[in-house]
Image (spheres, rainbow, N blue to C red):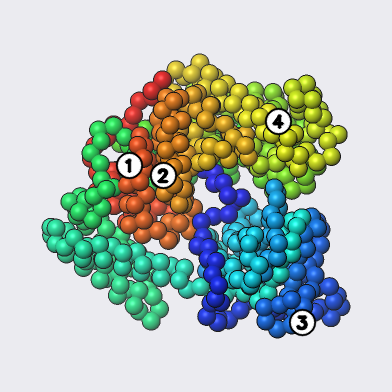
Amino acid sequence: MATIRVIIPFFLVFLCGMPTLAADNLLTNGGFEQKLADNPLLPDGWDVTHYQYEPLVFSPIHYSGKLSGMMVGDGVQRMWRQDVIAPTEKSWRLSAMVKAESLVIGKGEYVRLYAHVIYKDKPYSSTTHFSVDVKPGSDDWIRIAVNGAALLDDPIERIHISVLGKFSSGRVYFDNVSLTADMTLSDESLLANKIKDLRSNLERVGAVDDSVQACIEWLEKADAALAQDTPDVGTATSNWHSAAKMLSHEVWAAMYPDAMSDKPVEARMLYHGMGIDKAGSDAYLDKLELAGCNAVYLSFGSWMSVNYHSDLLPVQPGWEDFDALTYFVDAAHARGLKVFGYYAPFYGTSSPTVLPGSMYETHPEWFATGPDSNMPTFPDPANPEVVAFILKVYEELATRYNMDGIGLDYIRYPTPSALNYDENNRKKILEAYGIDIIEHENLYGDPEAWAKIQQYRYEQVGKIIQQVRERVKAVSPDSKIMACLISELGMARDEYGQNWGVSSKWIDYASPMNYDDHSKKTDMLADQLAVCRQNKSIFNTAIGGMPDLHRTWTISDWAERVAIQREAGADGIIIYRIGEFDTAVAAFFGKGPFYSDAVFPEPLK
């Protein structure tokens, strides 16, 4: 399941006027006071590690000390970067003092404080990112900061800390850059906060029934495990799970009445969750049942490789022997669960995995190329050979496996500026719009010309969605079509070529990816509902997010999001995602929002 927002996951971002309390800075020379002995253009401890970037320049305009780092609005990409080697901490606060004089941020421009957490012996694609942008209007010194945490348990090789930007008007000064350990995001602190949240709500409603006292006793055990000199997070987590499982539906309903529903028809789903073996699949199925779900939406991979047995795409290493999808579908159906599944045909990556027989190995000409060296690798949606191959993949899924429906994800361009600058696209665009994409000096920077390219892109994607539906229905008439969709309709259309305001007429179940706080944007939800009603698509809204969100949200946070979706008129709720889904939260859903029996909705068309 894709997440938009430039691969930056959910973190708490702060902008404030006062510096935080002092803590040990993991960065060397964060105030840029010492210059590198053999290169006076760089601060000691900092360098420029990307060939496309120039360094910042020193400035006597500073917040403290004598110097700061300055970026000027000359349209040049600039960066100072420092590596923190093998940190033992798992959560941090990254901050800096900034002053932005007459700053104007244009299209494709940015000023940013950025962290890349790189794990030992892991591919770069597993890197955790967190960042905070400098906004125009801060002509006086202010502090910008972001809290971030490692999302993998693996040892950390290094953290890249970058001060970088590119803009064409104004000046920005950086001073006192700091990376400090942040214990508020530690496992024990976040678990303690979840326990505190549940206990306070139990105290608020009182002894609804005997399950309240049973729950409190388990919460006390969890607290005791966390109170040890070395907190026993494992035992505390197990006790936390037991506490939530104790509570009856009546107690959950008393605490969160707006999140409850007795609707006889509603989609109640989880994303992901097909185990690599029987035991792994059974564990995910058990969690689906605990959560009261009536369907699941499985992730199969991308054009690089998949985790089911395919004759068209390479099978991911480790998934070759056990036919996990056949087992999962049969076992899910035996439990009364419907199964949908998707792969990502136009996923963009800077480091493609090349397995024997992969598209990238056999048909490198199918992949987009262009003047932007930072454009990710992705199959071209406008290439008819690519489309023909993708349709075969969907046909194979629809006929080989007894699923209830086919899912669409990454049915779009991977970035706002992505386009294949080949002769095929050149000819089509020249004939349709009179624009020569090869000869144009700055196509993406020309608003009038790029508006026509935006239309071209979403027309290509719309045709593919229609063709997928027609092909799947031709070979498997009972199969349904479900799609993961970018939340903001305008952004989806203009920046990613996914005009689902129109193309959802070919989709049975529309699942906007309303992750993080998108699920609280009621105006956006109303727009989504209106489109779904107009195009007769089931409005199956997503809530949740990446692993850090699951570490952070309390049960009250989940209940609030559920209540908002139901108030907005959603036909169903799909939780992203099962891999990090807290067992205690699953117990809440099973005895709370998903408690009553509900039939999975039939398509409206």
- Tag 4: Cα neighbours inside 10 Å, few (<14), some, or many (≥20)? some
* Image point (64%, 60%), residue name: 136
The residue singled out by tag 2 in the image is 522
**Mark sitting earlier along the chain (1/2):** 2
Per the image, label 2 sits on a secondary structure element best described as helix
**Mark sitting earlier along the chain (1/3):** 3
Q: Kindly identify the amino acid type of the residue bearing the numbered disc 3.
A: Gln
* Image point (71%, 27%), residue name: 383
The residue singled out by tag 1 in the image is 567
Q: What is the CA distance from the residue labelled 3 to the residue labelled 4?
A: 50 Å
* Image point (67%, 78%), residue name: 63
Camera-near label (3 vs 4) is 4
Reply above or below: 59 against 290. Answer: below
Q: Are marks 3 and 2 in contact (CB under 8 Å)?
A: no
The residue singled out by tag 4 in the image is 452
Q: Are marks 1 and 2 in contact (CB under 8 Å)?
A: yes
Camera-near label (3 vs 2) is 2
- Tag 1: Cα neighbours inside 10 Å, few (<14), some, or many (≥20)? few
Label at residue 34: 3
Label at residue 83: none
Q: Are marks 1 and 3 in contact (CB under 8 Å)?
A: no
From the top left corner, tell me how far across and down residue 75 is, in percent.
79, 55
Inspect this view and state whether residue 273 appears: no
Per the image, label 1 sits on a secondary structure element best described as helix
Camera-near label (1 vs 3) is 1
Along the line of sight, which residue is nearer the eye, 27 or 535?
535
Q: What is the CA distance from the residue labelled 4 to the residue labelled 1?
A: 38 Å
**Mark sitting earlier along the chain (4/1):** 4
Q: How many marks?
A: 4
